[in-house]
Amino acid sequence: MTKIIKNITDIFFKQITDFGGFFFYFLILGTCLFLNELELFFNLFLSFIFIMAIGILIKLVYFKDRPKKQRTTNLFEKLDASSFPSVHAMRAISIAFWLSLFFNNIFFTIYCFAIAIMVMYSRIYLKKHYFIDVLGGVLFSGIINILIWCYL
């Protein structure tokens, strides 16, 4: 019974982590374009550019092994194998932040941030990040999104 629960939990968190993934972010961007929500698209896209730039820059300068270490043979693999900051957490917070502002509904805001928190936990559960990596991703994303919101 314990093994079944563990397998279900593993599957659940492998699926939840996708809400902070590259593909899901671009699905949200594409939906914004399709619905002609250009301001939301622009804010999410700008946030994505800064998140990726800062995430890659930090990973180039400061390499930190993941809890479950990965072997690397080139620069791209090394970037992927670096744990700090959690770019999944950064993207999940960005989506939650901008969708919450856009819909301006407390229940939807709670829902968005609950999913973002599950994404963050999934990264730790799946041994992709340490808590400090996720926290760093949340802080960087928060700063990026607030700056975009205040100045653009």
Image (cartoon, rainbow, N blue to C red):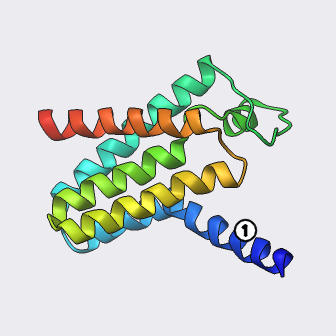
Name which quarter of the figure residue 11 lies in: bottom right
Left or right: 70 as drawn, with respect to 22: right
- Left or right: where 96 falls relative to 16: left
The residue lying toward the viewer, choosing from 110 and 123, is 110
| Residue 60 place in picture, x, y as percent | 62, 22
Work out whether residue 24 can be spotted.
yes
- Camera-side residue of 23 and 146: 146
- Percent position of residue 101, x then y: 18, 57
Q: In the displayed structure, does residue 64 sit left or right of residue 25?
A: right
**Type of amino acid under label 1:** Asp
Task: Name the residue at 68% across, 33% down.
Answer: 82
Residue 23 left/right relative to 138:
right
Looking at the image, residue 43 lies above or below residue 101:
above
Q: Residue at x 85, y 75 (%)?
A: 3
Task: Reply above or below: 42 against 104.
Answer: above
SS type, badge 1? helix
Q: What residue appears at the point 68 percent right and 54 percent down from the top-left corner?
A: 125
Across and down, in percent, residue 129 comes to: 65, 41
Q: Quadrant of the N terminus?
A: bottom right
